[in-house]
Every structure is written in C-alpha cells, then in structure tokens.
Amino acid sequence: MYAELRSPNIHEPLNMAEYNNTILSYRDVTPVLWAGGTEIMSRPDYYPSQRANVELISLDKVEELHHFLRNDRFAEFGAMVSINDIAQAGKLVLPRILLETINSTACRTVREKITIGGSLCTKSFKTNLASTLMILDAAVEIRYLKKRMHSKWFQLSRIYDKNGKLEMPEGGLLSKVRIAIQQYDYQYFRSAGTPISDKENAVALALVARFEQGNISYARIIFTLPDKGFCYSRDLDNLITSVQLPLSITRYATVENYVVDYIKENLSGISALQEARIRGLFHDMFRDMNETVLCYTPK
C-alpha cells in the first residue's frame, strides 16, 4: 500500500553559511525551500511525496532570515518574518495600503504562518501582497549560486516576467525585503474572491497617488489576477495621472473600457466574472477618488 511513497531528505540549516553549504552540496538538484509551508501544505497530495530523493530545506532555523531593521527611510525584513508580524511592527510607519493588503490576507492564524518571502515566491498563484509591494517600489535581496554564493538587490518587479511568473536564478533564495517608509495622499486596495480557493475568478486592485492642487500628479496602479499574473504598466500609470478629477460619467466610461481592454490584451483567458469584478473594483475606486479630491485639503 505504501510502496510508492517516498519521504524527502530534510535539511535544517541554522545560519546562512550552513544554507550555502547545503546548496553547494546539491548543485545538480533544485531543492524545495520550506518557509511557512502555507503554499506547500495547501497543494493536494504533495506530502508524502511520490518523487524519490526530494531535497527539502527548512528555513525556519536560519536566524538571519528572522531579522528586522528599521530607520527613517525604510524597513527591512528577513524572508522568514511573518506578514502578521510585519503588520504589527510597522502599523505606525508603513504605507496604509500595505497594512490593508496584509490584513485582507486569510485570517490572523494563517497570517502568523505566512512569511513575507514565501508570499512573494509562490508559484501556483500570484499574491496581492506581491502586487502592492511592487507599486510601493519594494526591493528584495536574492542569494544565488554560480561558482559560489552571491547576493544582489533587485526591484521586486524584476523577479517576475511580464505574465507574473517568478523568474529566480536556479536555486535562488529571496532573503530580505526592503520597503520605503513613505505615505501617499491617496491609497486604495480592494480585492474580490480568494486567490487560494477561487484563483480563476479572484481579482485585486491597488493604487497609490499624490495630489497637486486637487489633481493627480503621480499614480501607480496594478491589477492582480492570481491565476494569470499582474497587469502593471507605465501606460496605465500615465492614464490615471492624466485624469482630471472629479471625473465625469462620460469620461469615466472611456477610461474604464480602455483599462479593461488593456488587461485583456496583456492577460489572456479572463473569465466573465473576473471582468465584472475588474469593472466593479475600478468603478468603486474612482467614485472614492472623486469623493477624496472634492474633500481634499493640501497639507
């Protein structure tokens, strides 16, 4: 009955030196990295593994990956810091949109297990946290193997291709996340559906903007379709920045249709429910933005 089951070889490095030695010992094998385990354990029939000789590296005991640093300019989190701890530690300084994104992710019990590194490196679906961090210009440190272990900082958007597929170096490890401490005049995040149990129909929208004399002077917007990818483009940013607020109903219809058509062109196979949710989230955002700018008082 159990003849076909295989148990993985589990490694538990205590520091980055031991992690590097483990990776160097398995140059011809791509180990599976275990962070909080929320993605791996949610995949059906993943464990016990039916693949022989699986190398599994648990990152839980790597002390450096649990570190947290903050100064006046940025907050830096090790990859193993839970997103719940990030929300608690940064609730007074981190952008409000980031805290809203975290608090919309699962329940608190699950958020205590989800790590910041794991949420950015999921392969089975794209997370709302990744897209929010992208428009906040977050940076990540990647450790990767050539002849020896190297580390390099990248803008978060550079570790994904245009369809949101993770493009890490073979055997690479996302070890740190750096988030700028800054606020915006306008921050908006909403999601519909859940990326875990209904990723084919889930949608999220995130936007940050600055106002100048009641008009938008800077904007970054991103749509997340967990099963398809991220839709983020300078074209969309420029479109939002060019809008004169408050936006009329006629002008709004033109902008909405352009955005929906743009998403369809860049992310294929959008379901009817996803399209309806995109339109609904976008409509609610502009209604809220109109109300905000009409009541806006320059600081």
Image (spheres, grey):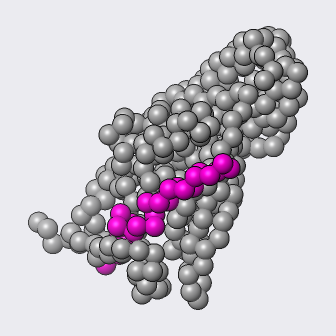
- Picture quadrant where residue 272 is located: top right
59 is higher (above) or lower (below) than 16: above
Give the x, y percent position of residue 110: 35, 42
The structure residue drawn at horizontal position 86% and vertical position 31%, both measured from the top left corner, is 217
Horizontal side, residue 127 vs residue 114: left or right: right
Q: Residue at x 62, y 37 (%)?
A: 95
Which of 245 and 72 lies nearest the eye of the viewer?
72
Q: Residue at x 57, y 28 (%)?
A: 190
Where does residue 25 sit, x and y in percent of width and height?
Answer: 42, 87
Judge whether residue 78 is colored magenta: yes
Is residue 271 or residue 23 the one in the foreground? Answer: 23
Q: Name the residue located 83 percent from the left edge and 40 percent from the top edge.
A: 235
- Residues 207 and 47: in front is 207
Position of the C terminus by quadrant: top right
Q: Viewed as shown, does residue 243 lie left or right of 182?
A: right
Nearest the viewer among 263 and 148 is 148
Boundaries of the magenta span:
53-79
Q: How many marks?
A: 0
